[in-house]
């Protein structure tokens, strides 16, 4: 069914014909919707409450997003296999990456205590609201957090199940699974370092912030999905080693640039576009590359204003920091302080430096891909993605 949607979108002659990228996203989302529908039916048969839980999980999976991971994996596959092969056999594998991504997002939001994601309440906030509206016993926030953790766990299991539905040979399945498992391990490792950095920002450095960017974001957003796509193409053929090397170089460079853009959006992004409050990284004391650069370039007074308490709360030069208080006046003061910190970061020149780092990485990635033995349509798509994925408003 999903392949019919993809082919139909590509061949339709109406003026509003979607691009191949739009058609791919439609096919991936169709595959997800079909798979999740069957899972909900299974949950419904056990207990109505489980059915509602599964529906909330489904809604979180299908609630928008750029679908970058399946897109990079698709072009990694097309780069080797060419444009004529039907996509049906690999669609479940591509869609599985979105289920893994939902697992990571839901758990990340619990860890960060985030209120919104893609302009909507995060999973733990949704479940806490359900608890309150239902008049249930116990702490709504605790119920929300534990339910969200279970959503993330469920999505990771669902990802495994959907990946197993890909029509691949046993040898190809093993190769794909090895890449997929490495991607998951690297994502967990990067997330732990990200959490650790908030607890000891004074121990962090620019190099360590880049290590976090490589593992938490570059690996599972670009590099491993590309190599996942290469594995989907099956047994090695002439040129596979060169393609593998090019995907490594391209994936690391664009993955890092993607995270660097995230660092900028985390401080300067428009909440109406990003779907998340501006300044969240500063509130939590996350030692991003942007913040590390600003501290290196700052004057002593600026560095003091950018300092954080061990708990991660903003600690301004006047010593009035601490956990964000609940009163409207104190919240307004905190917001004002965060806005001033954003100004200081820009004044140090760190924003300009990060923009230059992004440009260098995009240039490096395009160069790495230029002479790689991949099909021209994939090279063109990945060259375009190098820019669109790293120069985005959200």
Image (spheres, rainbow, N blue to C red):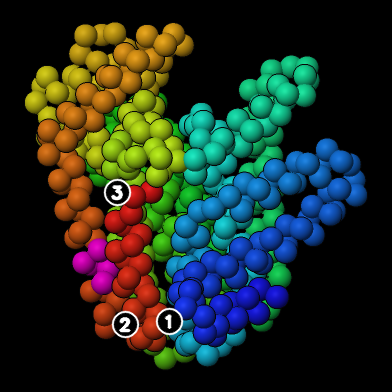
- Residue 361, by quadrant, is bottom left
Marks 1 & 3, CB-CB < 8 Å contact: no
Give the side of residue 20 with respect to residue 144, left or right.
left
First in sequence, mark 2 or 1: give its number: 1
Marks 2 & 1, CB-CB < 8 Å contact: yes
Which x, y percent locates residue 117?
Answer: 50, 40
Give the side of residue 173 with respect to residue 319, left or right.
right
Q: Is residue 170 visible?
A: no
Choose mark 2 or mark 1, whichever is in front.
1
- Residue 263, by quadrant, is top left
Q: Quadrant of the N terminus?
A: bottom right
Please state which of residues 28 and 290 is positioned toward the viewer in this rendering: 28
First in sequence, mark 1 or 3: give its number: 1
- Which residue shows up at 46% across the image and 11% down it? 326
- Mark 3: secondary structure: helix
| Residue on which the image places disc 3 | 260
Which x, y percent locates residue 16?
Answer: 48, 74
- Mark 1: secondary structure: helix
Whether residue 365 appears in magenta in the rendering, the answer is yes
Please state which of residues 28 and 322 is positioned toward the viewer in this rendering: 28
- Which residue shows up at 66% across the image and 62% down it? 32
Total number of numbered discs in the rendering: 3
| Residue on which the image places disc 2 | 372
Q: Residues within 10 Å of mark 2 (few under 14, many from 20)?
A: many
Which x, y percent locates residue 74?
Answer: 50, 73
What is the number of the mark on residue 79? 1
């Amino acid at each position: 069914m999903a392949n019919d949607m993809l082919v139909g979108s590509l061949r339709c002659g109406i003026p509003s014909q979607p691009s191949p990228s739009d058609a791919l996203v439609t096919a991936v989302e169709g595959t997800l919707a079909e798979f999740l529908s069957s899972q909900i039916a299974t949950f419904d048969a056990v207990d109505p409450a489980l059915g509602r839980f599964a529906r909330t999980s489904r809604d979180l999976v299908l609630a928008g997003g750029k679908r970058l991971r399946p897109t990079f994996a698709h072009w990694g596959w097309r780069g080797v296999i060419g444009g004529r092969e039907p996509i049906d056999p690999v669609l479940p594998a591509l869609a599985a990456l979105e289920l893994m991504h939902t697992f990571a997002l839901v758990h990340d939001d619990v860890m960060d205590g985030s209120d919104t994601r893609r302009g909507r309440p995060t999973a733990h906030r949704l479940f806490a609201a359900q608890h309150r509206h239902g008049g249930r016993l116990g702490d709504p926030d605790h119920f929300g957090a534990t339910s969200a953790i279970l959503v993330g766990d469920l999505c990771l299991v669902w990802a495994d199940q959907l990946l197993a539905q890909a029509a691949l040979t046993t040898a190809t399945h093993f190769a794909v699974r090895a890449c997929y498992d490495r991607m998951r391990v690297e994502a967990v490792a990067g997330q732990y370092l990200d959490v650790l950095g908030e607890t000891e920002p004074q121990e962090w450095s620019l190099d360590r912030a880049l290590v976090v960017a490589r593992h938490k974001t570059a690996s599972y957003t670009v590099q491993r999905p590309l190599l996942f796509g290469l594995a989907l193409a099956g047994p090695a053929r002439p040129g596979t080693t060169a393609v593998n090397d090019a995907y490594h170089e391209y994936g690391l460079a664009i993955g890092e640039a993607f995270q660097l853009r995230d660092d900028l959006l985390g401080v300067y992004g428009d909440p109406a576009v990003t779907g998340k409050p501006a300044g969240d990284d500063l509130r939590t004391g996350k030692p991003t590359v942007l913040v590390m650069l600003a501290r290196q370039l700052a004057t002593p007074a600026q560095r003091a204003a950018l300092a954080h308490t061990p708990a991660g709360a903003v600690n301004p030069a006047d010593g009035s920091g601490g956990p964000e208080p609940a009163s409207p006046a104190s919240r307004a003061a905190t917001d004002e302080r965060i806005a001033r910190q954003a100004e200081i970061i820009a004044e140090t020149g760190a924003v300009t430096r990060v923009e230059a780092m992004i440009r260098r990485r995009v240039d490096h990635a395009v160069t790495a891909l230029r002479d790689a033995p991949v099909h021209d349509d994939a090279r063109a798509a990945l060259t375009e993605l190098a820019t669109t994925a790293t120069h985005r408003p959200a």
